[in-house]
Amino acid sequence: MTAQSHPRVRFAPSPTGFLHVGGLRTALYNYLFAKKEGGTFILRIEDTDRSRYVEGALENLIEALKWSGLDYDEGPGKGGACGPYTQSERLAIYRDHVTQLCSVKKAYHCFCTPERLDEMRKQQEKMKIAPKYDRHCLRMAPEEVSRRLAEGAPSVVRMRIPETSTIVIDDLIRGRVEFQSDRVDDQVLLKSDGYPTYHLANVVDDRLMGITHVIRGEEWLYSTPKHVVLYGYLGWDVTAFAHLPLLLNADRSKLSKRQGDVAVEDYRAAGYLPGALLNFVALLGWNPGDDREIFGLDELVQEFSLGRVGKSGAIFNVEKLQWINQQHLRRLGPDAIADKLKPVLKKAG
Ligand code: GLU
């Protein structure tokens, strides 16, 4: 059977505190896409940004996913043939790929200090040119690079973006998207602490975990040209991409905490049914093609297709969630409702 007939998809959150409702939608669409096609849904933890490490965040995230009913097939605590599924446990793999990229001159060491980079950015701002690394270290003589490395000078590794080419993404939702490479920065791949950046770890793992479709939020679209170039440099075919529309507040600003709850655990604590929350987030960007609005998870699996996911931002409307929750409550029998009420009444004395 080909990879296409059995998709492998992943939800790849960074554990930074809680599961965002936008993250729940990404997880749900990946889950639905996999289950509909008899594929595999993977949970991968992207925890390589040590400055954003939050104690207990991973446990919260897994707990919120479990509550929602989106059970993953491979991932932390479950195992699978492509583990480990937590990036901080895969550092040697990323380093090997960076070494390979450096040896074919698709990546280079950069010794620039934060002060120099700051100064460079200020100059670029003054000259009204787009902020981009000026390739100071790309011009360094190889002997000088070796000397500095031997001395243990702190460095990062950057990828060398081609000077002038058009990078094309055939997005399953947005269609053909083009980027001019001269506008793309020489992205840092390996940080001075030896950890990979999101870009490197994400591409390497998508490949090594056999991911056939990358389904993620639109905010990652501008990273995708870097990823496409990396696939090429590593000699790999590019996976399929589908970038999901943004979630918006009622005033069409990007969904934020300031205008209401965004954590799945807040909705759980407020007493919403997990199935209702899933039904609600399913409709943030996708529609069934007719006027039906109430779906259980199994029904969503039957109905879902990426072809019915739109491009424009989806408005997060809590009143709609309340109405959907009501409809889900009506679908429950009296016994199930009694079971749900008992702990609430008990707590209230
Ligand atoms: N770690 C990224 C996040 O926090 C994953 C983005 C992607 O799916 O590529 O959302």
Image: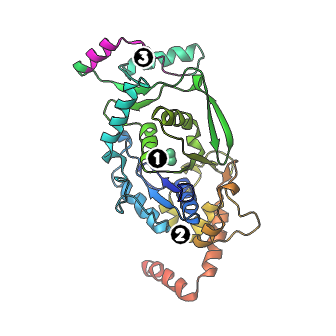
**Image location (x, y in percent) of residue 258:** 56, 49
In this rendering, is residue 138 above or below 301? above
Magenta-colored stretch includes residue 49: no
Residue lying furthest front:
1
Name the kind of residue labelled 1 in the image.
Answer: Asp
The dot on residue 206 is: 1
Q: Using the numbered discs, state the Cα–Cα distance from disc 2 to disc 1 in whole angstroms.
A: 29 Å
Q: Helix, strand, or loop for circle 2? A: helix
Name the mark nearer the viewer: 2 or 3.
Answer: 3
**Beta carbon of the mark 1 residue lies under 8 A of ligand 1:** yes
Drawn side of residue 115 relative to residue 19, left or right: left
**Image location (x, y in percent) of residue 68:** 50, 67
**Beta carbon of the mark 3 residue lies under 8 A of ligand 1:** no
Which of the image's four quarters has the C terminus? Answer: bottom left
Residues 298 and 39: in front is 39
Q: Helix, strand, or loop for circle 1? A: helix
